[in-house]
Image: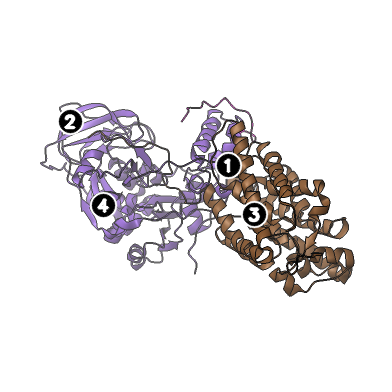
């Protein structure tokens, strides 16, 4: 049978060399820098102040609103300061800085109950208290996903094990080594959602990891092999590939009775519920030109410079540092930026400037767009001072810009269209005149 | 150790197929048919290719300098020059060839603003100019065997009702334009472009399908004197036009549905002109006609994007 997939997509060089490494642990650094805005939604509120002693796993910040998350300290030590610190977005944002005392004193764990005796609401409460956010990249608070609003029913939990970004192998190595825990975590999450079925979607370029999952599959937990194609792990693409359901434009997976969680997230759910361990560290792929590449458990808040120094220092042939994968990751220029719970990989790259030519109107962008958009329209309409009305359906996967022979930064143009569309609350007719776009905007 | 790092928005990786690579692939695809044209026409072909490529570059360079822009060799002038030369009668005086490519590059490309902006295929526009300026020279053909004046398979069919053997037309050992005669080698190049995804399959597919369909209708219902579908598919400039001229993305509608109509329209006009016009061949004019229609075809609504129709329903339910 041909593996399931979606329409469109690209095949960037995979570079999954780091899949050969098993998971190891990075030592904790002298100081950790925990940004208060480390999840999707509102920044958390610090509950510690300068000089407070903290233990490994103790809460240092609590959610401020529904879409917000708890933050735990990955080390024991003293709060050195709470001040603005460079963030991977390029801004300086409020961060709690903790001086590590290297005693690794753990915070007392709460009482752990048998997960099969917990009510759905209790599970999502544990998930919330453990500070679990989506580890696929968006860092959406997981408990919000696990407690669908009344009237919405989730029948299927889809576990995203695609890891379609080139270079990244953090999820793959986690599956290889912790498949049983991941399955257990998925069962707990499905229990919280009252979902009948669990489907794990995995690309067919990870046969070992897929086999680990297949060995543990059952009537209720299915493993679906998917075609290796970027962005197979895009939420809507994954749902379509495994179930044939199309999430509506501007809609959520909930609208088709599905919840999607990353493998890393369900593993964190397992650790929180079964072992009482909050989320303060994660597996990060250190790839490309790292002197010592690998899949490494890194405490949240560890500075980039510390990570690079622990792994043999910065090679000379590096002019670009990426947090995440090469297709959607963020370029980082400050060695003081710490990793967060959402950082799935760090890549040291040599990036050449892409030469820009005139648009050939070849429509390669449209033929690879996994959302069936015409990315070139955003560029053509921008030149006419207009916005592309369907841009809201764009998830910024970068397939169009990857494939553009003219090197046009299509994602930027799509973002500009989006920005303009979201400024006006009504859905606009195609190509309607909009507020003038500032040339230096986002 | 303060090091500087590059900042850019994602993606940070790009496919290797940039504009020069696209053009390079087109030249690779043309290579077999070009090699065959050297075999057929010898020095004449070599001179025509050189003159056309030289003047394509010269006029592009001059125009870019006049417009005070920087010259970037993206390879499009090379492709235009080669394609233009392939459409010329081998006996055409070299000066005429130079006029044609200069006209095509200047009027067909740079008056519109250069690569990416032109409405008409520059090579075909140059050829249309020569048809108007030097009709006699543009319609006199020589035999590859003895260089004596003769008729192409299409004009033999049109004006004296003779039908060439299919085998000879397929291989291309017959009178015709410099690079158009070997349907098989052009198909080979076209297949290469399709496999490499350099051209949109819709255009040649619907172009050839329309020619095959219309010529079958006439052949089977109106009489054998209209020529068989095989004859029409493999003679004249159809393969060159369908795979290399009509597929020029700049002159296509930026719309997949529009491109289907574009291809089919090319086929329709080709057969219309072959059957009912004063010319035996209609590929050049049919592509130019559809080029003119491309902006209109672009207005056809694109296919809905992913999940878009559900969202309309959602809004109605609320």
Question: Quadrant where the N terminus of chain B lies?
Answer: top left
Is any part of residue A296 visible from this angle? yes
Pointers 2 and 1 in contact (C-beta within 8 Å): no
Crowding around mark 3 (Cα neighbors within 10 Å: few <14, some 14 to 19, many 20+) is many
> Residue at horizontal 41%, vertical 53%?
A164
Crowding around mark 1 (Cα neighbors within 10 Å: few <14, some 14 to 19, many 20+) is many
Label 2 marks which chain's residue?
Answer: A
Chain coloured brown here: B
Mark 1 and mark 4: span between their CA atoms?
38 Å
**Looking at the picture, does residue A205 appear above or below residue A400?**
below
Q: Quadrant of residue A21?
A: bottom left
Q: Earlier in the sequence, mark 2 or mark 1?
A: 2
From the image, state whether disc 3 or disc 1 is nearer to you. 3
**Horizontally, is A341 left or right of A75 in the view?**
right
Residue A79's disc is 2
Residue occupied by mark 4: A293
Is any part of residue B186 visible from this angle? no
- On whether disc 3 and disc 4 are found on a single subunit, the reply is no
Label 3 marks which chain's residue?
Answer: B
Question: Is residue A110 or residue B18 the one in the foreground?
Answer: B18
From the image, state whether disc 3 or disc 2 is nearer to you. 3
**Looking at the picture, does residue B244 appear above or below residue A73?**
below
Pointers 3 and 1 in contact (C-beta within 8 Å): no
Question: Is residue A207 or residue B170 the one in the foreground?
Answer: B170
**Tag 1's secondary structure?**
loop
Residue occupied by mark 1: A359
Mark 4 and mark 2: span between their CA atoms?
31 Å
Residue occupied by mark 3: B49
**Tag 4's secondary structure?**
loop
Q: Earlier in the sequence, mark 1 or mark 4?
A: 4
Chain coloured purple here: A
């Amino acid at each position: 049978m041909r593996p399931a997939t979606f329409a469109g997509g690209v095949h960037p060089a995979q570079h999954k060399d780091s899949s050969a490494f098993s998971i190891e642990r990075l030592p904790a650094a002298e100081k950790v820098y925990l940004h208060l805005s480390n999840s999707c939604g509102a920044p958390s509120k610090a509950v510690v102040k300068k000089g407070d002693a903290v233990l490994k796993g103790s809460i240092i910040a609590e959610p401020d609103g529904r879409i917000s998350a708890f933050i735990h300290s990955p080390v024991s030590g003293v709060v050195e300061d709470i001040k603005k610190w460079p963030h991977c977005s390029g801004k300086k944002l409020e961060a709690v800085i903790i001086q590590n005392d290297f005693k690794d004193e753990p915070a007392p764990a709460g009482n752990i109950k048998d997960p099969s005796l917990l009510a759905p609401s209790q599970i999502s409460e544990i998930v919330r208290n453990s500070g679990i956010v989506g580890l696929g990249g968006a860092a959406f608070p997981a408990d919000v996903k696990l407690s669908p609003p009344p009237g919405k029913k989730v029948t299927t939990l889809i576990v995203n094990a695609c890891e379609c970004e080139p270079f990244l192998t953090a999820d793959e190595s986690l599956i290889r080594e912790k498949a049983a825990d991941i399955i257990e975590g998925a069962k707990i999450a499905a229990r919280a959602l009252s979902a009948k079925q669990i489907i794990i979607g995995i690309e067919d370029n990870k046969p070992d990891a897929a086999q680990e999952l297949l060995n543990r599959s059952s009537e209720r937990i299915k493993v679906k092999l998917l075609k290796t194609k970027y962005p197979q792990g895009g939420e809507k693409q994954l749902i379509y590939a495994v179930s044939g359901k199309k999430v509506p434009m501007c809609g959520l997976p909930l609208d088709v009775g599905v919840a999607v969680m990353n493998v890393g997230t369900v593993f964190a759910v397992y650790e929180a519920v079964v072992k009482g361990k909050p989320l303060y560290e994660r597996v990060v792929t250190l790839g490309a030109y790292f002197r010592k590449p690998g899949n490494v458990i890194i405490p949240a808040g560890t500075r980039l410079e510390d990570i690079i120094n622990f792994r043999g220092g910065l090679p000379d042939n590096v002019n670009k540092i990426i947090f995440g994968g090469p297709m959607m990751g963020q370029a980082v220029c400050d060695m003081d930026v710490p990793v967060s719970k959402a950082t799935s990989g760090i890549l040291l790259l040599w990036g050449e400037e892409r030469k820009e030519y005139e648009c050939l109107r070849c429509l390669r962008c449209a033929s690879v767009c996994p959302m069936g958009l015409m990315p070139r329209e955003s560029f053509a309409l921008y030149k006419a001072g207009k916005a592309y009305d369907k841009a809201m359906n764009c998830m910024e996967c970068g397939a169009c810009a990857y494939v553009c022979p003219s090197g046009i930064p299509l994602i930027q143009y799509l973002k500009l269209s989006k920005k303009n569309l979201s400024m006006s609350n009504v859905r606009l007719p195609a190509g309607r005149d909009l507020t003038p776009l500032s040339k230096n905007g986002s | 150790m303060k090091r500087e790092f590059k900042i850019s928005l994602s993606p940070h990786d790009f496919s290797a197929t940039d504009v020069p690579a696209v053009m390079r692939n087109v030249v690779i695809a043309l290579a077999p048919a070009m090699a065959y044209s050297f075999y057929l026409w010898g020095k004449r072909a070599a001179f025509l290719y050189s003159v056309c490529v030289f003047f394509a570059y010269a006029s592009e360079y001059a125009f870019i300098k006049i417009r005070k822009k920087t010259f970037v060799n993206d390879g499009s002038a090379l492709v235009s020059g080669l394609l233009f030369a392939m459409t010329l009668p081998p006996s055409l005086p070299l000066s005429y060839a130079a006029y044609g490519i200069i006209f095509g590059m200047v009027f067909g490309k740079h008056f519109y603003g250069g690569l990416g902006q032109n409405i008409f295929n520059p090579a075909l526009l140059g050829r249309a100019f020569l048809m108007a300026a030097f009709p006699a020279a543009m319609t006199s053909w020589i035999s590859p065997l003895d260089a004596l004046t003769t008729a192409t398979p299409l004009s033999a069919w049109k004006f004296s009702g003779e039908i060439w053997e299919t085998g000879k037309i397929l291989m291309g050992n017959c009178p015709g334009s410099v690079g158009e005669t070997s349907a098989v080698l052009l198909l080979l190049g076209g297949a290469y472009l399709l496999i490499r995804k350099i051209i949109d399959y819709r255009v040649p597919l619907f172009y050839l399908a329309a020619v095959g369909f219309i010529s079958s209708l006439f052949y089977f219902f109106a009489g054998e004197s209209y020529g068989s579908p095989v004859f029409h598919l493999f003679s004249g400039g159809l393969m060159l036009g369908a795979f290399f001229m009509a597929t020029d993305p700049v002159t296509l509608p930026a719309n997949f549905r529009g491109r289907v109509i574009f291809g089919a329209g090319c086929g329709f006009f080709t057969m219309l002109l072959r059957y009912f016009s004063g010319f035996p061949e209609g590929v050049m004019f049919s592509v130019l006609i559809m080029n003119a229609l491309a902006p209109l075809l672009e207005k056809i609504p694109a296919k809905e994007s992913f999940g878009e129709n559900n969202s309309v329903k959602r809004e109605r339910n609320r």
